[in-house]
Amino acid sequence: EAAVVLNTEALGIGALDAPTDLYVTDGGEIFILDAGNDRVVVLDKDFQADRVIVPKDEEGEPLDFKNPAGISVCSDGTILICDRKGKAVYILDEAGNQLRKVEKPESSILPKNFQFQPVKAEMDSGGILYVVSSGSYSGALQFDVDGSFMGFFGANKVEVTADVLFSYMWKSILSDEQRAAMTSILPIEYSNVDCGADGFVYTSTVGTQLPKSQVKKLNPLGNNVYFAVGNEEFNFGDEEITYNKTTPNYPSFIDVKVDADGFIFAIDLTSSRIFVRDQEANLISVFGGYGQQTGTFNTPVAVECRGDRVYVLDRLKNNITVFEPTEYGALVRQAVLAYDAGHYSEAEVLWKQVLQRNANSVLAYNGIGKALAQENRYDEAMQYLRLSGDRYSYSRSFGKNRLELVRNYGLYAIGGI
């Protein structure tokens, strides 16, 4: 539920002008990239104005931003600001003074027409910098601690559609000149990146007609390891959003954030809603939506988390909405965390409390079934997993239950025969 709506004009530091990004530190400070005013507004953990940072270049003059698009704050207080049209990532100290900047690298692996247009930069615990560049179809750019270019990281794959197959068929029989004249088939570019505390890199992807794996969890090799039960690709958000009978609109995730407990938050710009899933890809909640009332958005562009609070920046409303979990939402969160920690009996109790509040909760039936299966109570687990519709987990419990029956009574059956 929406708890607070933050408006900087009411705090006495002037109104925001088309803000593009925000970042919430572990200490609770809120950094807002106020793009229209070429400044960074910082609020303290109590939502009061703390300071305004005007980024400065190496000569001490205010930086001439062209299109500031993304902001991130490192654990040591270093500030990263991406200037898309300025084609640079500025690395600033706590006061906003430029330490260095990252520009288009010189490398033979970059296409000749490559344009460096950074929209988001994140630095992991090892000092590796990941930069999402608009128009880059080869993945995020990776920079080492010394600023040297390491290569691309975790590129998306080309979606296999009827048009793609038809194009490949024609290219296989055409001449080189004819193939060169055809439109190139490129994968979808990333829209945002977040370095999780677990060492994985989380990415979001803009709109696509095959909304599978639009949010990814990339390991150090750049491979996606985030799948639903049964190791299958899934839709992080809606499969299709239809505003009228003829115009389908597909999800387009503009930002992604993973909190300290592993819950993944992503903004679907198409529906102006925030989808939340756990590490097993279970849908935990969906909130927000397009509108003018409190708790809804016009153009949400950034989501951040701290504890159980969620912060959403709306670019056109020029404000930040802070959400806190309801009693029901907090109970679901506790149940997921109890199961992840291996406290299966506690998780079973919590999920049953969820069922008392919502008898139609598929997530609760699934959680109870998995908890019972972990305690080798397969008969009971199968009853709940059947209600949840989780065929994969049901099959696993069924198989283990049958194995136990064979072990316990197999010799008696053979003797009887």
Image: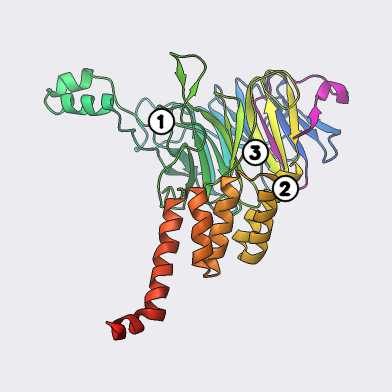
> Which quarter of the figure is the C terminus placed in?
bottom left
Q: Residues within 10 Å of mark 3 (few under 14, many from 20)?
A: many
Label located before the other in sequence (2 or 1): 1
Location of residue 131 with respect to 246 vertically, above or below = below
Task: Say which amino acid is labelled 2.
Answer: Ala
Task: Say which amino acid is labelled 1.
Answer: Ile
- Gap in angstroms between the C-alphas marked 2 and 1: 35 Å
Camera sees residue 125: yes
Camera sees residue 126: no
Q: Is label 3 in contact with label 1 (beta carbons under 8 Å)?
A: no
Front label number (3 vs 2): 2
Front label number (2 vs 1): 2
Label located before the other in sequence (3 or 1): 3
Q: Position of residue 346 (x, y in %)?
A: 67, 63
Q: Position of residue 351 (x, y in %)?
A: 65, 54
Q: Secondary structure at mark 3?
A: strand
Residue 179 left/right relative to 303: left
Q: Position of residue 187 (x, y in %)?
A: 37, 32
Q: Secondary structure at mark 1?
A: loop
Q: Secondary structure at mark 2?
A: helix
* Label number found at residue 72: 3
* Label number found at residue 188: 1
Q: Position of residue 182 (x, y in %)?
A: 23, 19
- Gap in angstroms between the C-alphas marked 3 and 2: 28 Å
Q: Is label 2 in contact with label 1 (beta carbons under 8 Å)?
A: no
Label 2, on which residue?
330
Q: Which residues are magenta?
A: 1-27
Residue most extreme to the bottom: 415
Please name the residue shown 55% across and 69% down the image.
Answer: 375
Q: Residues within 10 Å of mark 2 (few under 14, many from 20)?
A: few
Location of residue 35 with respect to 237 vertically, above or below = above
